[in-house]
Amino acid sequence: MPTERNNKISCYEYKYEMEVTLEVLSGKWKALLLWNLHQHSIIRFNAFSRYIPEITHKMLTQQLKDLEKNGLINRIVYDETPPNVEYSLTKRGEEIILILEQMNQWGKNFIEEYKNMGSS
């Protein structure tokens, strides 16, 4: 669960449980990182840049740390030179994929409806 936040209410003071989900997925990249892990099962750190070229190295590191801290991804470091780090979904991470699939479908529907509004 997310820890105490500086300028927001505590996780234990949420009015609705869905706020926890939104907090865990908050940010531009977390859902995309999870989605890519779902698509590819295991991803090395540098491979994320191929799947999401717009993400900076610093932001990728930060977002992966948050996802790991919240128990959504596994991080395995192999003792090699150069270091090899692989990421995969945890059971909890796999559970959230159902939500992301619904969000993806909703987005597809929205785009289609938006296109149709413009052509009518």
Image (tube, rainbow, N blue to C red):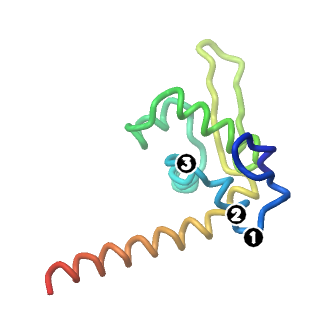
Residue 85: horizontal and vertical position, in percent? 64, 29
Q: Amino acid at mark 2?
A: Glu
* Residue with the mark numbered 2: 19
Q: Nearer the viewer, residue 40 or 6?
A: 6
Residue found farthest to the front = 7
Residue at 78% of width from left, 62% of height from top?
14
Label 1 sits on a secondary structure element that is: loop
The residue indicated by pointer 3 is: 27
Label 1 sits on residue: 16
Residue type (three-letter) at the residue carrying disc 1: Tyr
Picture residue at 14% right of the left edge, 81% below the top: 119
Label 2: few (<14), some (14–19) or many (≥20) C-alpha neighbours in 10 Å: some
Q: CA distance from mark 1 to mark 2?
A: 6 Å
Residue 95 x, y percent position in the rendering: 70, 64
Circle 1: is it few (<14), some (14-19), or many (20+) Cα within 10 Å? few
Residue 76 in the image: x percent, y percent? Answer: 71, 33
